[in-house]
Structures are given as structure tokens and as C-alpha cells.
Amino acid sequence: MKTTIIGGVLFLLPAAFILFVLSFALRLIKKLAAPIVHILRLDHLGNVAGVGAVTIASVVVLILLSFAAGMIARTAVGKRVTRWSEKSLLGHVPYYQLVKSMAEGLAQIERGNGLKPVLVNIGASWQIGYMLEEQLEGGWVVALVPRAPSPLSGNIMYLPSERVRPLGITLVQAMSIVKAMGAGSSAALRGVDLRLPSADH
């Protein structure tokens, strides 16, 4: 119970920080959006599903700004500015690196950059993980073994290929099992050879 509660708190803290930052940004944009909505005479439309025109306009502006910032960040100039800001300013802000790592992890999962659900042999047991690279020298592989209930944080492990076995499930299904503290494993492991590597020889 204690471990589960602590894991839940650690999982929620970054999410709460992101919500706080977005809320702060939304309040700032509202101050800019309010006169624009008034000039365009959109305020007479009233509320849509209980949400005011200024709030809707602010969300749209925030999405457009995020998209534009993302496009700029992919350019050479944007990458230089990002590196400079991380070294001189943002690197000292609490939780920045944690939130940045989460965002990069989500982006990688969204792109599907070779992440494959696998079983990782650790001692006399198996743990669910994600294959990161499988072309290391000597037939070794790199895998991330997540710590439940957080599917995006865990340990990077370097293992012989015989200690890693692929799973015939999607990455989303694997992450769901981690978040559910193992619930749904019976369906995911159906037909998988769970003999330990030492028993194969």
C-alpha cells in the first residue's frame, strides 16, 4: 500500500506541474484574447457548453502558439536557442528536466521509434519492458524496465539478447499493464515461453 501511494504521488507531481504551467499560460493569454474577442464582436455569442468565448479563444491561441513553437524548435536556430536556454536558465528550474524528459518520452512513443514491448529476464523472474536498441556489440540489447504504476520511468538495462523476449502486444497495451500494476497480464502473456534462459540449454 505504501509503495503504491508513493508511486502514485511521484506519477502525479509532474502532471500537476504541467497543469499549473498551462493554467498560468492560459491566464496570460486570456488578457490578450479578451480585447481581440471584443474587437471581433465574438463576446455576444455568449457561452458554448458553459465555456465563455474568451476562454475558447485563449485555448485556440495557446494551441496555435504551441504548434508554432514546435515548428520553430525543429529548426537549427530553434535548437540552438533551446540548448542555450536549458544551460543558462531552465536547467535550474525545479521539475523542468523531469517534465522535459516526460515530453520527450511521450513524443518518442507517439512516433513509435522502434520501441517494442518485451519480457526482460532479471534473476529468476521476468519483467515487462520496452526494447530500445537491439544492435549492440556482442549481441546485447538495451531495454527500459518501467516501475509500476508509471510506464514512462524506470531503469535502463543492458542485457544479452537471450534474456529478452518479444511480446505480441502493442506498446499501448504494455503501458496499460504497467499502469494497472500487472492487471491484464494473462492475456498479454498467453502463449509466451516463460522458461528462464538457463533452462533453455
Image: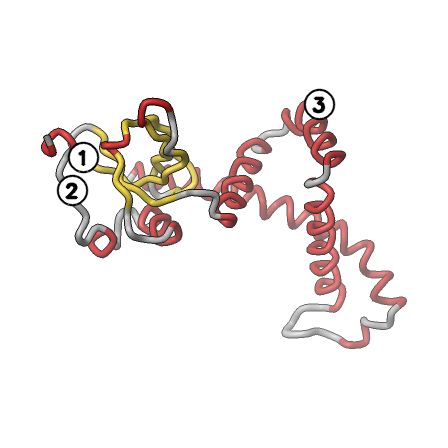
> Mark 1 is on which residue type?
Ser
Q: Secondary structure at mark 2?
A: loop
Q: Residue furthest bottom?
A: 45
Is residue 8 or residue 142 the one in the foreground?
Answer: 142
Q: Marks 1 and 2: CB-CB under 8 Å?
A: no
User: Quick check: 159 left or right of 85?
Assistant: left
Q: Nearer the viewer, residue 181 or 77?
A: 77
Residue at the right extreme of this rendering: 39
Nearest to viewer (mark 2 / mark 3): 2
Q: Which mark is residue 194?
A: 2
Kindly identify which residue carries mark 1: 125
> Image quarter for residue 163?
top left
Secondary structure under badge 1?
strand
**Comparing labels 1 and 2, the label whose residue is closer to the camera:** 2
- Residue at 23% in and 30% down: 122
**Residue highlighted by disc 3:** 88
